[in-house]
């Protein structure tokens, strides 16, 4: 299916759109960070992955409904704005933007450290050069960005598929059976060595490594394929991501006893060493670097589009809304790249204080954003949006039960962070970020209310309010 003539002329095609979302989700955390989840929860972490995938699918299903009901273009924040009003768009937009700007800085440093082993240049120089190079590609052409992301994500997917094939063949041919099978799946006690309560505690960590599916709406808006195509993608991207996690995690747990996995160590690399893959360290280093480039590329794309969208609504300086060739927000790209470089610099200047605080302050904001997505969907359903009702998603068919279940699950993840000594500071810092965004919006509305002829209401919630 080739799509409409408009889609054929669009800078982003269907084959690019899903790859852009997966590019943000399949970052370095997928290949390296999954070891910390298994170390904390044992093999029962598979249940955490499954629960997170289902939760993500539910949120994306609701976004798919809102894509059909809301004719506006733009990111998922536009649909939150439609459901909750101007305050929802402001808060969700800046929370999401802040999170990905911190990701840009941290991923840039990770990539620079890897490049430092090859190029005799300081990390403090390599990090901004890496961001600058990708920002220039983003600013040159949307098609160049899309093709680059397609290639990078294709490399990651091919690597995962090849790894799964090698791991399965190893498990089938190994005599005796790989040690992970008996150590991890020999009994219920071995499957959940720390009990099943830690499954909920691992949800936030798994969720942070699986976020990024929302990018699909930003890319779909520039694809020219229409809202029905975007709806299909929102409902499938969560399933695809959960499939990648489970298909790779099961062979790893069959090969490696969970006690051998630890935070900061790639379980993929450990499994490749056991399998006997030649040059496993070099191969894994290259794959992780590709994942970093892909994540940086997607992050610069989504942050620049979101910042320009916020500027369109008066939630950011109007100068940032300027676009070249009607699609490329060059000033927003430059601003996001500069902010990412600043975060990277702070990680070198003050890694234990300022940078650590930024990581904590952005750590759980995505959970707040997902809560706002569900609230927006519930508001549109409650007000009797007929188009939303006709969308026919699970969120509509099971409403309001579906809203309650997803909200409780998201709040449960936050409660799990509150009960974890290591994650509690992150939750409090992220709550501070939420309070700061609400405070900034209150100041903005107060200043607008002082202008002649502007309504005084500080927190409008009407769906028609898009100021």
Image: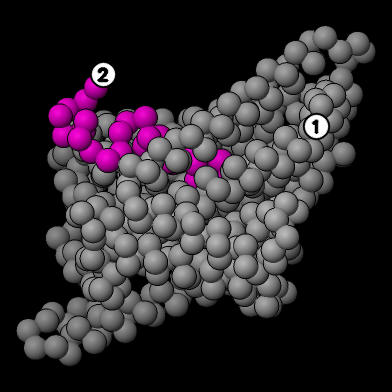
Q: Which quarter of the figure has residue 273?
A: top right
Q: Furthest residue to the front?
A: 120
Q: Furthest residue to the right?
A: 176
Which residue corresponds to the image point at 89% horizontal and 24% vertical from the top-left?
179
Q: Is residue 191 left or right of residue 226?
A: right
Q: Which residue is mark 1?
A: 279
Disc 1 is placed on an element classified as loop
Q: Is residue 60 above or below residue 155?
A: below
User: Which percent across, then down, holds residue 202?
Assistant: 67, 47
Tell me whether the residue at label 1 lies in contact with that at label 2, contact meaning CB atoms closer than 8 angstroms.
Answer: no
Q: Furthest residue to the left?
A: 453
Instruction: Depth check: give the residue in front, 331 or 431.
Output: 331
User: Which percent across, then down, holds residue 203?
Assistant: 62, 47
Please report whichever mark, 1 or 2, sits nearer to the chain's N-terminal start: 2
Q: Is residue 24 magenta?
A: yes
Disc 2 is placed on an element classified as loop
- Mark 2: few, some, or many residues within 10 Å (few <14, many ≥20)? few
Q: Is residue 129 above or below residue 351?
A: above
Q: Nearer the viewer, mark 1 or mark 2?
A: 1
User: Which percent across, then down, holds residue 265?
Assistant: 79, 45
Q: Quadrant of the C terminus?
A: bottom left
Q: Is residue 47 above or below residue 158?
A: below
């Amino acid at each position: 299916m080739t799509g409409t003539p408009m889609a054929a002329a669009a800078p982003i095609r269907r084959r690019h759109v899903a790859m852009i979302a997966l590019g943000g989700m399949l970052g370095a955390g997928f290949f390296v960070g999954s070891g910390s989840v298994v170390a904390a929860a044992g093999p029962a972490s598979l249940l955490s992955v499954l629960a997170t995938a289902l939760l993500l699918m539910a949120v994306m299903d609701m976004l798919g409904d809102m894509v059909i009901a809301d004719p506006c273009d733009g990111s998922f924040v536009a649909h939150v704005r439609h459901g909750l009003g101007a305050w929802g768009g402001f808060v969700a937009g800046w929370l999401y933007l802040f999170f990905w700007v911190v990701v840009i800085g941290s991923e840039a440093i990770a990539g620079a450290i890897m490049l430092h082993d090859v190029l005799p240049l300081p990390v403090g120089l390599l990090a901004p050069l890496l961001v600058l190079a990708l920002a220039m590609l983003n600013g040159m052409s949307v098609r160049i960005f899309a093709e680059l992301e397609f290639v990078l994500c294709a490399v990651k997917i091919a690597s995962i598929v090849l790894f799964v094939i090698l791991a399965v063949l190893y498990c089938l041919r190994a005599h005796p059976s790989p040690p992970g099978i008996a150590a991890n799946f020999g009994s219920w006690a071995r499957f959940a060595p720390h009990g099943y309560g830690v499954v909920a505690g691992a949800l936030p960590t798994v969720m942070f490594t699986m976020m990024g599916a929302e990018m699909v709406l930003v890319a779909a808006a520039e694809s020219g394929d229409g809202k029905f195509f975007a709806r299909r993608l929102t409902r499938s991207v969560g399933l695809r991501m959960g499939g990648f996690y489970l298909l790779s995690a099961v062979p790893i747990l069959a090969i490696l006893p969970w006690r051998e996995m630890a935070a900061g160590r790639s379980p993929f690399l450990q499994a490749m060493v056991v399998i006997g893959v030649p040059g496993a360290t070099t191969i894994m280093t290259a794959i992780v670097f590709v994942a970093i480039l892909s994540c940086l590329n997607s992050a610069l794309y989504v942050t620049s589009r979101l910042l320009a969208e916020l500027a369109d609504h008066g939630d950011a300086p109007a100068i940032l809304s300027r676009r070249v060739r009607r699609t490329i927000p060059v000033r927003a790209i430059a601003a996001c790249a500069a902010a990412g470089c600043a975060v990277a610099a702070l990680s070198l200047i003050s890694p234990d204080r300022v940078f650590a605080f930024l990581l904590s302050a952005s750590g759980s904001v995505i959970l707040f954003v997902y809560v706002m997505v569900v609230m927006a969907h519930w508001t549109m359903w409650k007000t009797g949006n007929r188009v939303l009702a006709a969308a026919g998603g699970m969120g509509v068919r099971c409403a309001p039960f579906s809203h309650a279940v997803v909200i409780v699950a998201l709040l449960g993840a936050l409660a799990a962070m509150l009960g974890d000594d290591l994650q509690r500071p992150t939750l409090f810092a992220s709550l501070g970020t939420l309070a700061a965004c609400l405070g900034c919006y209150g100041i903005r509305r107060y200043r607008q209310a002082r202008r002649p002829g502007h309504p005084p209401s500080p927190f409008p919630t009407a769906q028609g309010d898009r100021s």
